[in-house]
């Protein structure tokens, strides 16, 4: 019973508009990632949910209750900060105990709850240490412990893994997924790391420039990006985007015509510039009739990322298996998987013009 | 990489300069323990031939030095307590709250921190006379606030900015009120800054001369600065050893601070607006 | 309960109120002991007031006319500038030099630092007493020390004649306040990354080149701030000069602070003194604005 809703929320700092027309409905028990580049407003959104920032207008509710005027401590939420924000002068035990103390829980119950949380996160041997004496990973777990000790309805996590090294980060990712499964609580997770968002979240809210770009499942965000920004932000390497014109059932780029299936796109495709999007894994080398030259080959061991240059100098990326032999400077013919083409309006956050159906989800490696 | 010779020269040069700088202080101590007869030897004896503490004894028993000392302790402690209490709350407000006029206020604090005392002294004198506070310690405490409060506010503001905002945010989410977070989280974190500010304020107030000169003119309320100076002026034959003994005694709190709390003084420097 | 859709949220308003409440005592004290006296000083400057009786009458701009046409203010301004420039230069040169030495790995470094720091925190009264004893023409250690070293042939009258008095005051000022420069520069030196020196050494820079090409550019910002701050403080210095020379001989070391004090409490002309103090503040305002703008830029 803890939906989280943002209704037409706007946030302004002085004259700077940080967020505009933000509408997000998070269902109870969901794990939602707020994903976007720095400055996109994702942290501000989270801090408004926590009550640490105040919306300029709009309405925020948690568990069906409008919380605009509710103090952070009374919203039944817990938050994990990027810096962990452990109280330096308190021991680990006192840190975890603090939220209970502030809620007037009896001492004996507090001790029991702290021990339970410590046990869950393997913190028992550290309870008497000060935060300074802990490693980054341990501090991270203490911050989690402080959040979950009082059993809140909603967890807010602000880039909690970004200060950990790569190995620990992937371990903690698995831990967090497991924790979410076990607790079944609503979690809102801010990150700029698409890998975290894709692997952990049940739905991703992609944000850019103070606006929500798309709010959908990881698969949908990847396969049916709502606009050019989402298309380029999600996926590594990102989607190739070629500017050109639609001409009947072809897309003209670099003096060549790429056949497209008009029925897959919205009817009202007028004339003018459009952007054709295709992910690198759907660019086939030696399978089409678009002449290109290989400029760079990056072999990661299990695959190769190939930089190709079209005759007019446009560059695009292709992903192929590692075993294939490709040489820099080699001239090749390339083609695009016809079912994997996206068409966008030309502006930076230009709308995707495909008719959205399940058919546009193509299993990877179907070349 | 450093040759022993280079090290030796470097040390000799540095220590010669250090001792030269410290010489007036050493001379003060040496003079204070020389007997009166040895004092007026020409040329002076660089090391005392006999050591005596008679001047200290005379200072404590025959002059109002102890009264001055007590006045200075009361004055500096009260000023410090007053200013640090106001300054801590004020700095919390300036750093962690948003309201109209906050920036202007911060600039005003910085401005007053640089203001010359002589501009304020005339109106302050008139004010103290008008409300009947002239020639009291209270008037001096109020006057010392004029430089101590901007100073303390500026210092504490800087220390406060060094405390991560996330700590307070975490406390709020954990269920604390603003003042609760202030008490539980910020105050313990600010403690070293408060100590540093208190030491600075105490020393400033302890050393202050001009306000004491203008606002107070009787021995019973005079602090050390004007009190000891009056000992210089009142005697026809200046008793340097007595004055040097008084100087040493007057510097006692400072020596104690230096011996045990020096790190707080150096950290106050970084906060006092000398960052680059 | 309906949400406040466009108005400031109640919680934010409550926080703002708390913030104002916390600063309120400070504002009250500020207004009482700083803002009011400051305005009063400007108000008093258009009166002629006799200090012992505090009786006064309105004289309009007379005091300011006297300030502009009389030579007292300009004389004191000149003295103040000489004093400020002289003592500040010594403070910076000795301060930076000493900081560089103390940054090296010398024996008993922390003791050396304490000894160097001490004069700054010492009461001006104590400093002045010690130096007046050192400067004493008959028994002073200064004259005898310099004579034993062969620098002087006969004792000098240090504080009673010019230009010795000005030199003496500048020297004592430098001695008392240069530790400020030492601490600030030392703190900055400790943050210069070692790899800059290594890079310079690889590029073949000797110690002198390393100082000018690596150390100085890194110190430039902190030095600007120090110079501004010390210039302001030296400009308004009262205790040290008043206690050493009382402004004398005659008025040759009478800085603006001393002039104001002398006018108000020596010559009993409080209105004129207030006008002088306002004039002094206007001159200082230049430095103050520079410093405030600089500090504002950094934060």
Image (cartoon, coloured by chain):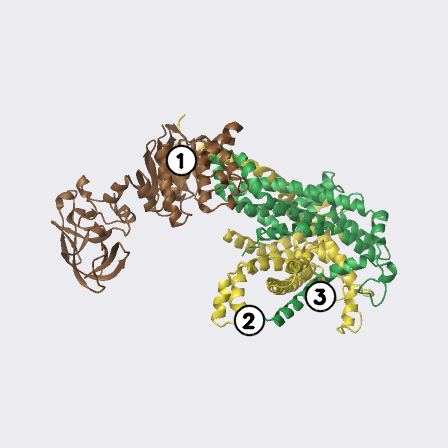
* Number of other residues with Cα within 10 Å of mark 3, as a class: few under 14, some 14 to 19, many 20 or more: some
Callout 2 secondary element: helix
Is B47 displayed left or right of C294 in the figure?
right
The chain letter of the yellow chain reads C
Is A6 displayed left or right of C172 in the figure?
left
For the image, the number of numbered tags is: 3
Callout 3 secondary element: helix
Instruction: Give coordinates of residue C189: x percent, y percent.
Output: 56, 60
> Tags 2 and 3 in contact by the CB under 8 Å rule?
no
Q: Mark 3 lies on which chain?
A: C
Instruction: Give coordinates of residue B220: x percent, y percent.
Output: 80, 43
Distance from Cα at disc 1 to Cα at disc 3? 70 Å
Chain A is shown in which shade? brown
* Number of other residues with Cα within 10 Å of mark 2, as a class: few under 14, some 14 to 19, many 20 or more: few
Distance from Cα at disc 2 to Cα at disc 3? 31 Å
The chain letter of the green chain reads B
Residue B24 occupies quadrant: bottom right
**Res C167 label:** 3
Q: Are marks 1 and 2 on the same chain?
A: no
Q: Mark 1 points at which residue?
A: A155
Name the N-terminal-most of marks 2 and 3: 3
Is B246 displayed left or right of C225 in the figure?
right
Q: Does residue A11 appear in this view?
A: no
Callout 1 secondary element: strand
């Amino acid at each position: 019973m803890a939906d989280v809703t943002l209704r037409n929320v706007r946030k302004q700092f002085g004259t700077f508009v940080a967020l505009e027309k933000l509408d997000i409905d998070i269902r109870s028990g969901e794990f939602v990632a707020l994903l976007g580049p720095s400055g996109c407003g994702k942290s501000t959104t989270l801090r408004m949910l926590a009550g640490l920032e105040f919306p300029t207008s709009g309405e925020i509710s948690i568990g069906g209750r409008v919380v605009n005027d509710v103090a952070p401590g009374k919203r039944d939420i817990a938050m994990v900060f990027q810096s962990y924000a452990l109280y330096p002068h308190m021991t680990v035990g006192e840190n975890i105990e603090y939220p209970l103390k502030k809620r007037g829980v009896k001492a004996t119950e507090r001790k029991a709850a702290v021990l339970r949380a410590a046990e869950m996160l393997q913190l028992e041997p550290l309870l008497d240490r000060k935060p300074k004496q802990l490693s980054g990973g341990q501090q991270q777990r203490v911050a989690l412990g402080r959040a979950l000790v009082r059993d809140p309805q909603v967890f807010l996590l602000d880039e909690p893994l970004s200060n950990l090294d790569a190995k620990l980060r992937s371990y903690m990712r698995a831990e967090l997924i497991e924790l979410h499964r076990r607790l079944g609580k609503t979690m809102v997770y801010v990150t700029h790391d698409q890998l975290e968002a894709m692997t952990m979240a049940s739905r991703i809210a992609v944000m850019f420039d103070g606006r929500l770009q798309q709010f959908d499942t990881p698969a949908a965000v990847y396969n049916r990006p709502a606009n050019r920004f989402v298309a380029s932000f999600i996926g590594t390497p990102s989607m190739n985007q070629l500017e050109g014109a639609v001409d009947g059932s072809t897309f003209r780029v670099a003096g060549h015509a790429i056949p497209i299936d008009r029925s897959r796109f919205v009817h009202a495709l007028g004339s003018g510039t459009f952007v054709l999007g295709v992910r690198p894994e759907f660019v086939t080398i030696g399978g089409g009739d678009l002449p290109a030259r290989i400029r760079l080959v990056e072999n990661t061991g299990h695959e190769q990322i190939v930089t190709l240059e079209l005759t007019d100098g446009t560059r695009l990326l292709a992903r192929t298996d590692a075993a294939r032999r490709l040489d820099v400077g080699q001239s090749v013919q390339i083609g695009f998987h016809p079912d994997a083409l996206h068409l966008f309006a030309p502006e930076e956050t230009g709308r995707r013009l495909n008719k959205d159906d399940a058919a546009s989800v193509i299993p990877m490696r179907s070349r | 990489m450093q040759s022993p010779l280079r090290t030796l020269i470097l040390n000799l040069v540095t220590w010669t300069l250090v001792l030269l700088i410290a010489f007036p202080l050493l001379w003060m101590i040496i003079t204070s323990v020389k007997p009166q007869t040895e004092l007026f030897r020409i040329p002076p004896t660089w090391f005392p031939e006999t050591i005596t503490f008679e001047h200290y004894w005379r200072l404590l028993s025959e002059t109002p030095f102890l009264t001055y000392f007590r006045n200075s302790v009361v004055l500096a402690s009260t000023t410090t307590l007053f200013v640090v209490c106001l300054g801590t709350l004020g700095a919390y407000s300036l750093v962690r709250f948003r309201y109209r006029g906050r920036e202007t206020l911060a600039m005003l604090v910085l401005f007053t921190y640089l203001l010359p005392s002589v501009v304020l002294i005339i109106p302050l004198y008139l004010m103290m006379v008008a409300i009947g506070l002239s020639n009291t310690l209270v008037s001096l405490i109020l006057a010392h606030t004029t430089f101590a409060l901007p100073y303390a506010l500026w210092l504490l503001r800087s220390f406060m900015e060094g405390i991560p905002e996330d700590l307070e945010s975490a406390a709020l989410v954990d269920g604390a009120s603003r003042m609760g977070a202030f008490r539980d989280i910020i105050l313990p974190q600010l403690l070293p800054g408060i100590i540093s500010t208190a030491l600075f304020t105490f020393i400033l107030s302890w050393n202050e001369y001009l306000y004491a000169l203008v606002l107070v003119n009787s021995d019973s309320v005079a602090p050390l600065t004007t009190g000891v100076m009056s000992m210089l002026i009142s005697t026809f034959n200046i008793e340097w050893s007595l004055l040097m003994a008084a100087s040493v005694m007057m510097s006692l709190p400072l020596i104690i601070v230096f011996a045990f709390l020096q790190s707080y003084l150096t950290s106050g420097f970084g906060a006092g607006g000398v960052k680059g | 309960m309906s949400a406040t859709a466009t108005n400031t949220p109640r919680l934010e308003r409550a926080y703002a109120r708390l913030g104002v409440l916390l600063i309120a005592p400070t504002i009250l004290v500020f207004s009482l002991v700083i803002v009011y006296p400051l305005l009063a000083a400007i108000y008093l400057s258009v009166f002629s007031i006799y200090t012992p009786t505090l009786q006064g009458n309105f004289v309009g701009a007379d005091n300011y006319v006297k300030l502009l046409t009389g030579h007292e203010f300009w004389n004191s301004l000149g003295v103040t500038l000489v004093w400020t420039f002289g003592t500040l230069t010594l403070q910076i040169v000795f301060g930076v030099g000493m900081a560089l030495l103390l940054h090296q790995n010398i024996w008993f470094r922390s003791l050396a630092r304490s000894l160097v720091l001490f004069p700054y925190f010492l009461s001006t009264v104590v400093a002045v007493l010690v130096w007046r004893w050192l400067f004493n023409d008959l028994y002073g250690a200064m004259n005898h020390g310099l004579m034993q070293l062969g620098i002087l042939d006969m004792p000098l009258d240090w504080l009673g004649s010019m230009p010795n008095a000005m030199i003496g005051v500048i020297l004592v000022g430098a001695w008392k306040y240069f530790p400020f420069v030492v601490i600030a520069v030392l703190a900055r030196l400790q943050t210069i990354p070692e790899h800059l020196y290594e890079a310079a050494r690889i590029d073949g820079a000797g110690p002198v080149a390393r100082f000018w090409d690596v150390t100085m550019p890194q110190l430039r910002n902190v030095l600007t701030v120090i110079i501004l701050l010390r210039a302001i403080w030296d400009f308004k210095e009262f205790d040290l000069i008043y206690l050493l020379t009382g402004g004398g001989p005659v008025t040759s070391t009478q800085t603006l602070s001393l002039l104001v004090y002398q006018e108000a409490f020596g010559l009993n002309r409080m209105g004129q003194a207030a006008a002088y103090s306002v004039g002094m503040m206007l001159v200082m305002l230049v430095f103050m604005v520079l410093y405030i703008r600089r500090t504002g830029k950094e934060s």
